């Protein structure tokens, strides 16, 4: 059997690869390596458990990598351990996902040892050079041998950059996991009862990006805007946000209900039943449109253009007036009902199967 090695290291990638890893195991001589870019019980291990994803064959330097993720160091801290893993591997192909530090580090290490790169979730572009992820996307795409894009739009971006061969439109595997586990989440999660909240009577918020939380004035502006709207806010607090709040000496407004990070099933339940979600996460934008929940994105640009054009997602930046206006616009209109009719641009939940089938034919 063809030898392949998959490397990733963050919580969103666990979700997006959860349905693909078993298929790769079944059809290839497959080694699964977790880089440890995210490594904590709250952020990682519970996701492996709930998604029933097997343990990695190797976990690389989690403590050093966790430091990189928290303090904002670059991908270089991950390269030595990844390079060691690839140097000892006979695999011809390296599979990477998305646009994280792990993605770039694994790609560079793979090229160093003559591996062929397979990039899943290729072609995303924000055209915002301030985003570190944008640099990763471009560098990895232009050094990949096989590229899997989510949509026709993302494939067209690659065309414009001269990448016209060995690319395939397959959808986004986040839909695979979302649809597979939604029923279980609705049935087994007790998070709404535990928080004493009801369907469509709260706003879910997730924030973690450095440009939003590492600047005290911006973080406080976001928190005040959320607190001022009068709706119940649920904020599963990211470790980075918790760290910054303590450093800045902030007191989060009482109207924001801060909870510890939750597992995947609880997060699905919270998202599915929210009146809307406010986020700076790329993955949450995809999950929101999959679950037909309106989304406000606390950024000036996004690489998830399809959610914007579908009318399910709005870029609101971090200005209080814009955040407040869009909250009112969503909650005081029939927007959520309209979103129920939107066809998901990211596919039908068969992305993992499509990718593995193509790989079997191609490699």
Image (cartoon, rainbow, N blue to C red):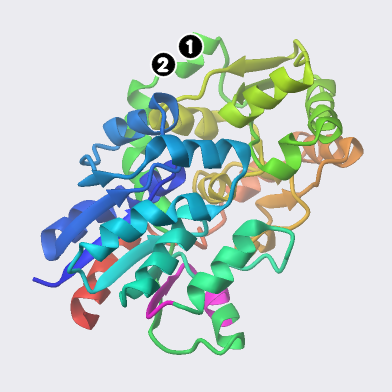
What secondary structure is found at the residue carrying circle 1?
Answer: helix
Does 216 sit above or below residue 117? Answer: above
What secondary structure is found at the residue carrying circle 2?
Answer: loop
**Among all residues in the image, which is located at the extreme right?**
321
Q: Residue at x 39, y 34 (%)?
A: 44
Which numbered disc covers residue 11? none
Does 24 sit above or below residue 314? Answer: below
Residue 271 located left or right of residue 60: right
C-beta proximity under 8 Å, tags 2 and 1 = yes
Residue segment shown in magenta:
144-156
Q: Which residue is drawn at 38% across and 62% down?
A: 96
Horizontal and vertical percent for residue 40?
Answer: 41, 28
Q: Quadrant of residue 50?
A: top left
Q: Mark 2 points at which residue?
A: 190
- Is 195 one of the magenta-colored residues? no
Q: Which residue is drawn at 64% across and 24% down?
A: 243
């Amino acid at each position: 059997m063809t030898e392949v090695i998959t490397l990733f290291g963050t919580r969103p990638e666990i979700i997006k690869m959860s349905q693909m890893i078993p298929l790769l195991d079944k059809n290839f001589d497959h080694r699964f390596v977790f880089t440890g870019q995210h490594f904590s019980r709250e952020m990682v291990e519970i996701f492996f458990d709930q998604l029933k994803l097997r343990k990695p064959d190797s976990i690389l330097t989690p403590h050093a990598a966790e430091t990189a993720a928290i303090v904002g160091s670059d991908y270089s801290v991950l390269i030595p351990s990844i390079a060691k893993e690839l140097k000892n591997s006979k695999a011809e192909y390296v599979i990477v996902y998305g646009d994280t530090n792990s993605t770039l580090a694994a790609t560079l290490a793979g090229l160093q040892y003559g591996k062929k790169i397979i990039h899943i979730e290729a072609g995303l572009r924000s055209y915002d050079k301030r985003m570190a992820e944008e640099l990763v996307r471009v560098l990895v795409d232009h050094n990949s041998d096989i590229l899997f894009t989510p949509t026709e739009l993302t494939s067209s971006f690659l065309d414009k950059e001269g990448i016209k061969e060995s690319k395939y439109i397959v959808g986004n595997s986040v839909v695979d996991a979302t649809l597979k586990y939604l029923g279980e989440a609705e049935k087994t999660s007790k998070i709404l009862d535990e928080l004493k909240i009801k369907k469509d009577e709260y706003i879910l918020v997730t924030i973690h990006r450095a440009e939003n939380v590492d600047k005290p004035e911006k973080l406080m502006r976001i928190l005040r805007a959320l607190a001022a709207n009068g709706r119940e806010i649920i904020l599963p607090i990211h470790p980075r946000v918790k760290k910054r709040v303590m450093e800045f000496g902030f007191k989060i407004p009482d109207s924001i209900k801060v909870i510890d990070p939750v597992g995947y099933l609880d997060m699905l339940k919270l998202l599915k039943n929210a009146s809307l979600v406010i986020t700076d996460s790329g993955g949450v934008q995809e999950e929101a449109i999959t679950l037909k929940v309106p989304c406000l994105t606390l950024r000036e640009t996004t690489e998830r253009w399809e959610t914007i054009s579908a009318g399910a997602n709005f870029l609101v930046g971090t200005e209080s007036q814009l955040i407040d206006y869009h909250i009112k616009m969503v909650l005081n209109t029939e927007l959520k009902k309209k979103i129920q009719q939107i066809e998901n641009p990211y596919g039908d939940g068969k992305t993992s199967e499509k990718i593995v089938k193509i790989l079997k034919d191609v490699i």
